[in-house]
Image (cartoon, rainbow, N blue to C red):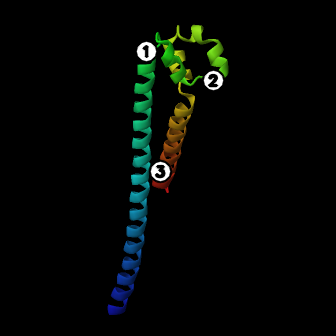
């Protein structure tokens, strides 16, 4: 009877230690995922505020350069200024790409998280 208790205790210790280690790595992964989310959120919020300010100052010629438009968008600038949604989509392309990449990174981590939970 004592030998069986020792075997059960060893098995439980191994199982508990394994699950504790796995739980810690799971917590670290989710912390990383949340950090990426908040980075994306902050980037997106700051970028939107910048675009809003640039849109408000669209009448000033000196702010047009700050839009950092691609060459093909500069040629159709007069038409672009007529549409707020399209203008904001085209302005600050490098910063928009960085925010887009951070969003994709978060989505990837989110999919991994779901897969890990299912496992």
Q: Residue at x 48, y 55 (%)?
A: 116
Residue 93 horizontal/vertical position (percent): 57, 28
Q: Secondary structure at mark 3?
A: helix
112 above or below 72? Answer: below
117 above or below 23? Answer: above
**Marker disc for residue 70:** 2
Q: How many marks?
A: 3
Q: Residue at x 36, y 92 (%)?
A: 3
Residue 43 or 61: which is nearer the viewer? 61
**Marker disc for residue 111:** none
Marks 2 and 1, Cα distance to the nearest angstrom? 19 Å
73 on left or right of 62: right
Is residue 1 something one can see in this rendering? Answer: no
Is residue 22 something one can see in this rendering? Answer: yes
62 on left or right of 46: right
Residue 11 position by quadrant: bottom left
Marks 1 and 3, Cα distance to the nearest angstrom? 42 Å
User: Which mark sits nearer the N-terminus, 1 or 3?
Assistant: 1
**Marker disc for residue 57:** 1
Q: Nearer the viewer, mark 1 or mark 3?
A: 1
Q: Secondary structure at mark 1?
A: loop
Residue 62 or 93: which is nearer the viewer? 62
Kindly indicate whether the residue at mark 1 contacts the one at mark 2 (C-beta within 8 angstroms): no
């Amino acid at each position: 009877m004592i030998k069986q208790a020792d075997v059960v205790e060893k098995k439980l210790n191994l199982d508990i230690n394994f699950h504790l280690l796995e739980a810690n790595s799971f917590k670290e992964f989710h912390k990383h995922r949340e950090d990426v989310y908040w980075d994306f959120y902050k980037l997106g919020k700051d970028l939107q505020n910048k675009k809003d300010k640039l849109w408000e100052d669209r009448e000033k010629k000196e702010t047009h350069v700050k839009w950092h438009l691609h060459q093909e968008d500069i040629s159709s600038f007069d038409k672009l200024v007529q549409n707020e949604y399209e203008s904001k989509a085209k302005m600050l392309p490098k910063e928009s790409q960085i925010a887009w990449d951070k969003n994709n990174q978060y989505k990837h981590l989110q999919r991994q998280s779901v897969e890990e939970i299912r496992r």
